């Protein structure tokens, strides 16, 4: 009887394990189905429906990172930059929380880092945005995008203090002026590094041109101001010429593709 009892116990455990595995497999399949439905609703801009399906997918399979990424993105696209309503800010916070949850499972997920930094940037929380841009740089030093992000923020911070023509500079204390100069220098350094990685990065050139103009505003000597303006003008022209060449190349590629398609 003891031997028979052991056999029954073993059979019971095997059946229990099989049942658990079966439920796990079914949950994962159901999660995939919910993910597909959520993506379809998201693509159709039915965001409430997308949220429901994607949350179901996450509940069924917490390891399904794609479902969390789509859920976070669904919240992000509903956030309106600059809007201060509670509902709007909650959309941003929900997106950030889920992207951070993805990073807890996949610390090197650059898409989540980029989205978080972008949301903070849109919210005007520039300190947090730059913090996350730096995390992106640490994760992938060969990516010029977060360097560009830092450069654009630093230009905005400086421009807000100096004004359109630089008339506000005279109202800054020496300490404030030094702080603005440090911000500009950080932005210049970031954009120069971005251009080292990707020399054809015309948007980075344009913002570097703008930061050179900020250096000119902050310069105390006329000669120094003129030198920064000259460097800015040269860079602006270089960016425009490179942009023109890129557009011409894109047009040639389009004509070649169209011709090949028609030939087939």
Image: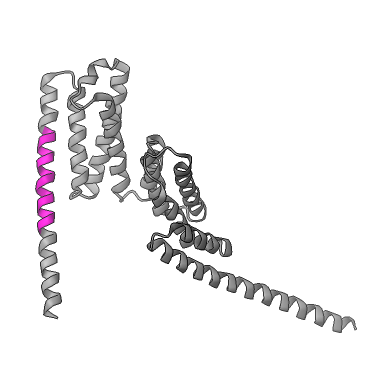
User: How many circles with numbers are drawn on the protein?
Assistant: 0
Expressed as whole percent of the image width and height from the top left, the position of residue 212 reads 18, 32
The quadrant holding residue 223 is: top left
- At a point 31% along the width and 36% down the height, the residue shown is 153
Q: Main secondary structure of the magenta part?
A: helix
Asked whether 162 or 205 is in front, the reply is: 162
Residue 50 among those drawn in magenta: no
Q: Is residue 210 left or right of residue 75?
A: left
- Residue extending furthest right? 1
Expressed as whole percent of the image width and height from the top left, the position of residue 209 reads 17, 36
- At a point 46% along the width and 51% down the height, the residue shown is 99
Q: Is residue 88 left or right of residue 208?
A: right
- At a point 37% along the width and 36% down the height, the residue shown is 124
Can residue 170 be seen at all in this image of the molecule? yes
Asked whether 46 or 211 is in front, the reply is: 46
**Height in image: 223 above or below 186?**
above
Asked whether 154 or 6 is in front, the reply is: 154
Can residue 108 be seen at all in this image of the molecule? no
Expressed as whole percent of the image width and height from the top left, the position of residue 43 reads 38, 63
**Height in image: 54 above or below 14?**
above
Q: Is residue 247 left or right of residue 2?
A: left
Asked whether 139 or 17 is in front, the reply is: 17
Of the 4 image quadrants, the one containing the N terminus is: bottom right
Residue interval drawn in magenta: 231-248
- At a point 42% along the width and 52% down the height, the residue shown is 112
Specify how the rendered protein is coloured. one colour
Of the 4 image quadrants, the one containing the C terminus is: bottom left
The quadrant holding residue 154 is: top left
């Amino acid at each position: 009887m003891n031997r028979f009892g052991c056999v029954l116990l073993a059979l019971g455990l095997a059946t229990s394990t099989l049942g658990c595995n079966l439920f796990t497999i079914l949950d994962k399949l159901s999660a995939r189905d919910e993910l597909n439905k959520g993506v379809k609703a998201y693509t159709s801009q039915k965001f409430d429906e997308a949220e429901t399906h994607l949350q179901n997918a996450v509940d069924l399979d917490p390891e399904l990172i794609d479902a969390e990424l789509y859920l976070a993105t669904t919240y992000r696209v509903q956030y309106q930059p600059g809007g201060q309503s509670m509902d709007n800010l909650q959309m941003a916070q929900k997106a950030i929380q889920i992207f951070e949850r993805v990073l807890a499972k996949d610390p090197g997920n650059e898409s989540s880092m980029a989205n978080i930094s972008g949301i903070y940037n849109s919210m005007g929380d520039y300190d947090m945005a730059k913090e996350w841009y730096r995390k992106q740089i640490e994760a992938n030093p060969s990516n010029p995008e977060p360097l560009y992000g830092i450069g654009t923020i630093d230009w905005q911070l400086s421009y807000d203090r100096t004004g359109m023509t630089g008339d506000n500079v005279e109202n800054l204390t020496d300490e404030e002026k030094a702080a603005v100069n440090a911000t500009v220098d950080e932005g210049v350094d970031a954009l120069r590094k971005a251009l080292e990685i990707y020399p054809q990065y015309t948007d980075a050139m344009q913002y570097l041109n703008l930061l050179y103009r900020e250096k000119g505003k902050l310069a105390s000597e006329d000669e120094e101001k003129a030198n920064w303006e000259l460097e800015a003008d040269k860079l602006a022209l270089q960016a425009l010429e490179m942009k023109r060449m890129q557009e011409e190349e894109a047009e040639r590629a389009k004509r070649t593709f169209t011709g090949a398609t028609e030939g087939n």
